[in-house]
């Protein structure tokens, strides 16, 4: 039996619940997940009338929108890389640096400079060419 509270559960589909025609977000599961799909036609009105559930949906959506806005603001490269590193768990390895540099819209050289700074700060350790291990969250 799975025991969870709303605080333990990540909610996807909040935008679809409120307006199924407007879906600007995509998600990627980085850990094992359980999914539950509810048909909007059947359950939308019931869910929208539940104040506890609706509050959770609003908080979840607000957090996602805040993150989306923060990602559109110009920020230093070190902070962009730190945000990307926060998605990993301590102990995870980071590789495929060419693709990561492309995702951050920087050159490989720029990314390597920032990774070296994080190594000096004890956030990462350089294991071998192109592979780093996260020691702590930045």
Image: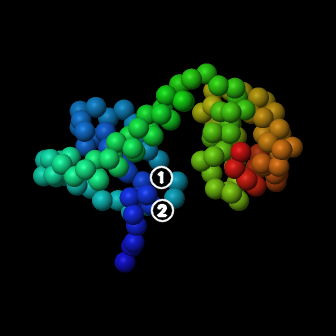
Q: Residue 49 at what x, y percent from top left?
A: 18, 48
Measured along the vertical axis of the image, is residue 40 above or below residue 83?
Answer: below
Measured along the vertical axis of the image, is residue 76 above or below residue 64?
Answer: above
Image point 68% across, 39% down: which residue? 82
Q: Which residue is mark 1?
A: 29
Mark 1 → mark 2, Cα distance in angstroms: 7 Å
Compare residues 11 and 116 and report the one nearer the observer: 11
* 115 with respect to 70 (left or right): right
Whether residue 40 is visible, yes or no, is no
Q: Which residue is mark 2?
A: 32
Image point 20% across, 46% down: which residue? 48
Query: Do residues under tags 1 and 2 come within 8 Å of each other at their CB atoms?
Result: yes
Q: Residue 73 at what x, y percent from top left?
A: 57, 23
Location of the N terminus (image quadrant): bottom left
Q: Residue 45 at what x, y percent from top left?
A: 15, 47
Measured along the vertical axis of the image, is residue 101 above or below residue 33?
Answer: above
Quarter where residue 109 is shown: top right
Image point 44% across, 39% down: which residue? 64
């Amino acid at each position: 039996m799975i025991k969870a509270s709303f605080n333990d559960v990540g909610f996807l589909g909040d935008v679809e619940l409120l307006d199924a025609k407007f879906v600007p977000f995509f998600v990627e599961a980085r850990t094992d997940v359980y999914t539950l799909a509810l048909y909007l036609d059947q359950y939308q009105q019931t869910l929208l009338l539940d104040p506890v559930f609706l509050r959770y949906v609003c908080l979840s959506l607000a957090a996602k929108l805040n993150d989306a806005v923060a990602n559109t603001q110009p920020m230093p490269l070190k902070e962009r890389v730190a945000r990307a590193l926060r998605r990993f768990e301590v102990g995870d390895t980071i590789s495929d640096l060419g693709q990561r540099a492309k995702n951050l819209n920087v050159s490989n050289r720029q990314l390597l400079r920032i990774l070296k700074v994080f190594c000096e700060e004890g956030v990462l350790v350089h294991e071998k060419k192109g592979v780093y291990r996260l020691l702590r969250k930045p």
